[in-house]
Amino acid sequence: MTEATESDAKVPPPPTQESNTDKGITQRDSSCKICSGLIPQGDYHRESKVNIAQLSESWDKGCKTCGILRDVFLGCLPDAASQEGEVIWNIRLSRFKPIWLSDYTEIRLDIFKLPSTVGPFGCLHSRSIPSGHTGSSAAFRQAKEWVTGCTKSHNLCGTGPACPLPTRVLDLGTNESSSIFKICVTQNRVARYICLSHCWGSHKTPTTLIKDNLDSLVKGSLISGLPQTYQDAILVTKRFGIRYLWIDSLCIVQDNADDWRRESSKMAEVYQNSYLTIAATCSAGGEEGIFTAPQPSYATKTFEFSNKGSETHIYGRQLFPHHRYDLLGDSTAPSDFSNTSPLLSRAWVYQERLLSPRVLHFMQEELVFECAYGRSCECGYFQSSRYDFSLKKSFTESIQKATKQLNQDHWYEVVYVYSKLKLTFGKDKLPALSGVAKLVNRQLKDVYLAGLWRSNLAKQLCWSKPNGHQTPKPLQWRAPSWSWAATDGRVSLFSTRDETFVTFHETICEPKGIDDTGEVKSGYIKLSGKIAPAVLVPMELRTSETRRYGVDPSTHFDVSVGGKCDLHYTTSFDPDYKIPVEFDQASMNVTCLLLMGGLSAGSWTDLFLVLKLVDETIPEYERIGIVTRKTSSREEWIPDETKTVTIKII
């Protein structure tokens, strides 16, 4: 295995003049109609729509700012010269964001200066020039600087001390040039170690730990026989001077169910105690490796300008896709990551990121470092972004503050993001989040019920599958129907009301193994509350409504109580999964359980669980959805004289 070569791109030296206030040198004609409104004042940004022809004309009239924008535009996108008057671009200059030239597609240009230098106008941001290859010596020097700085000054992250090793690790030896690794059974040995977070890929990894090869791997094996991603991770581990590396596929016996359950239950400790986690973020499988170079379109271009007799350099490039580096909301769906950052779409990886004190991402374009204090990247975007938000930072702070309500609120956010991620095996739905659940429960000191917490169970039951996100009901049972873990795909939490209308008598979840936050084999809730018989009514939507809301009319239903069906006005029914239309009339009969509610602005907003009777002798139900209903009179569905009944939900 050879070390990746460092980029040999050369950058002109920055000017010696420095400016702490970054006022810059304003070179623009105040009467210029193109750029005079672009220089921002205060915290606001301004935008202007222009094309190349307009910038060229303004430059000819003497506006140097327009000349700079034109040169950067053509230098970074040479093909744009043939479209001078055709493509309308949006120019955004902001005090706290990069200067963008955008054609409302994926192309955005970032114009910047180097740190501690003066640019030709004051709103230029300071950026760095990336190494050009994530396996280069320059890239490693940057990674080493990040990690060292974190261990020395970040109290929330810790110093990376020697910790008890996981049950098994790869022993790389003390000789950096060694071509051999061994599987080491650690027996509570204490040392620093690194973890690898990676995608297995569509094909089974060539080398996994199984019963038949355990003895031979303990004796030793060639590093060159491992998948390329593992070889690269070993090189990085050795560069950091660390002897031990933990890789799930080689440190857990994959064909031993007991070993898998036992070791997967220790995930929280494995990642929390690691010195660093190497994330093969841009690799979809073990054979791809982790070292990459950005596409030529992302190369940094240098532009030289003369200003009052001195040379000034500014730089331009297509903006790296930083929005793909995290899952924080609806604007970024897992599909956005499938090509450029496949690792970030995987559910198992989510807790690995949250639990590890430090994560080094090998992205397609650059290295990104993530810890409890935020994120850093080679190009400098995250360091200079005033509005950068890291869920890892937010989560770590909530754990450290140890307030019960804060941890419950963050749990909702964790579940919301986690539910959008991909799992190869549905049975892993709870195990893949068990480490985070254990960490949260250190502060909550609560009872964990298949993804929910008993102390606030009524509110926890108010999850829903938003319209258009229903998937078929999983064929294999993995959680009680009242748990979000029983479904596939994204879940949301309703804004709940003040009153709770149910009383819980029993809440039982039986784990499948020794881990009470992992797989479960059964579970039920026994409670008392008021119920109303109802009927599911297939709803025929107009074509325009189907297009507008993305709803499949063949699987969308109203809930009718007492013959009243008012979905379009006051009621919203969200099924937990796609309900087949081939129901007979008996299977359309359901029960609505009043769960929570409250009075707001003169009307009631109530939440009902929609239940299906499975055993009338107990009676025993399973959940199939949830209804939100706004009304001036609750008695339309639940008359005051309605008796409270005790039911069991499985």
Image: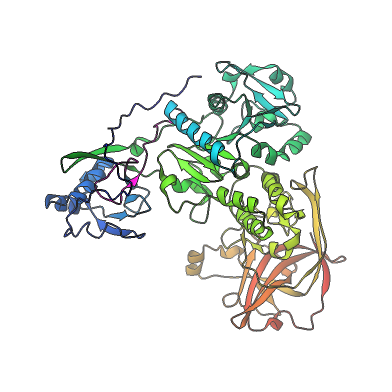
Residue 19 is drawn in which quadrant? top left
State left or right for residue 112 relative to residue 420. left
* Image spot of residue 30 (x, y percent): 18, 58
Q: Quadrant of the C terminus?
A: bottom right
Magenta stretch secondary structure, dominant: loop
* Image spot of residue 627 (x, y percent): 66, 70
Q: Is residue 232 visible?
A: yes
How many marks the image carries: the answer is: 0
Q: Is residue 41 magenta?
A: no
Q: How is the image coloured?
A: rainbow
Q: Is residue 489 visible?
A: no
Question: Residue at horizontal 73%, vertical 69%?
Answer: 590
Residue 71 is drawn in which quadrant? top left
* Image spot of residue 57 (x, y percent): 14, 52
Q: Which residues make up the magenta segment?
A: 113-135
Q: Which residue is nearer to you in this view: 182 or 446?
A: 446
Question: Residue at horizontal 49%, vertical 68%?
Answer: 543
State left or right for residue 278 relative to residue 635. left
Q: Which residue is nearer to you in this view: 275 or 563?
A: 275
- Identity of the residue furthest to the left in this view: 61
Q: Is residue 117 magenta?
A: yes
Depicted 411 relative to depicted 127: above or below: below
Question: Residue at horizontal 76%, vertical 32%?
Answer: 256
* Image spot of residue 222 (x, y percent): 61, 17
